[in-house]
Image (tube, helix red, strand yellow):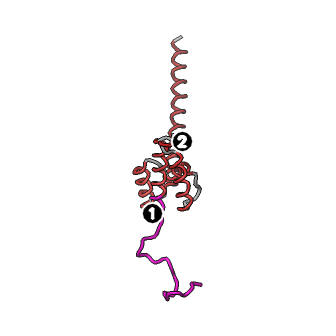
Amino acid sequence: MAKYIAQIIVLGGQIIGKAFTRALKQEIAASQEAAKRAGGGQKGQNRAAANLRTGMTLEEAQQILNVTKLDPEEVEKNYDHLFSVNDKSKGGSFYLQSKVFRAKERIDQELKEAKPPEGEKTDTGTGKPGEAVQ
């Protein structure tokens, strides 16, 4: 009888050990994938800082505002609509209005980081005013 109990305990330990190992491997793979998506180096640090500051990722912000690409006009249009629809005086939800505001704030942060600095030249023209760049 004791022999069977010992076998059950050993078998149970093996099953739990294998499940733990599998879960650990999945967690490591998910972590590496998330790090890859965030980008490495300074870009990844900036994105992580923006995520912490606003409390949401860029993907979440895009889902909330229902935008697929970071087009400032589309973001502004969707923000205005969702913000006014969720106005508390119109029977809306302050919580949802806050989420919409934070989503726009997160996307604005991303757009600001994507824009080149003011002093940096983006035009490779001849420098003569009024002349078309070919």
**Residue type (three-letter) at the residue carrying disc 2:** Gln
Query: Helix, strand, or loop for circle 2?
Result: helix
Asked if residue 117 is positioned above or below residue 88 in the image, the reply reads below
The residues colored magenta run: 108-134
Which comes before the other along the chain, label 1 or label 2? 2
Q: Measured from the top left, where is residue 95 in percent x and y?
A: 46, 41
Asked if residue 44 is positioned above or below residue 121 in the image, the reply reads above
Rendered residue at 49%/40% (across/down): 93
Identify the image quadrant of the N terminus: top right
* Residue identified by numbered label 2: 26
**Residue type (three-letter) at the residue carrying disc 1:** Lys
* Residue identified by numbered label 1: 112
Query: Helix, strand, or loop for circle 1?
Result: helix
20, 130: nearer the viewer: 130
Q: Measured from the top left, where is residue 5 in percent x and y?
A: 52, 15
Predominant secondary structure, magenta span = loop
Asked if residue 25 is positioned above or below residue 103 in the image, the reply reads above
Q: Measured from the top left, where is residue 48 in percent x and y?
A: 43, 53
Number of residues whose C-alpha sits closer than 10 Å to that of mark 2, classed few (under 14), some (14–19) or many (20 or more): few
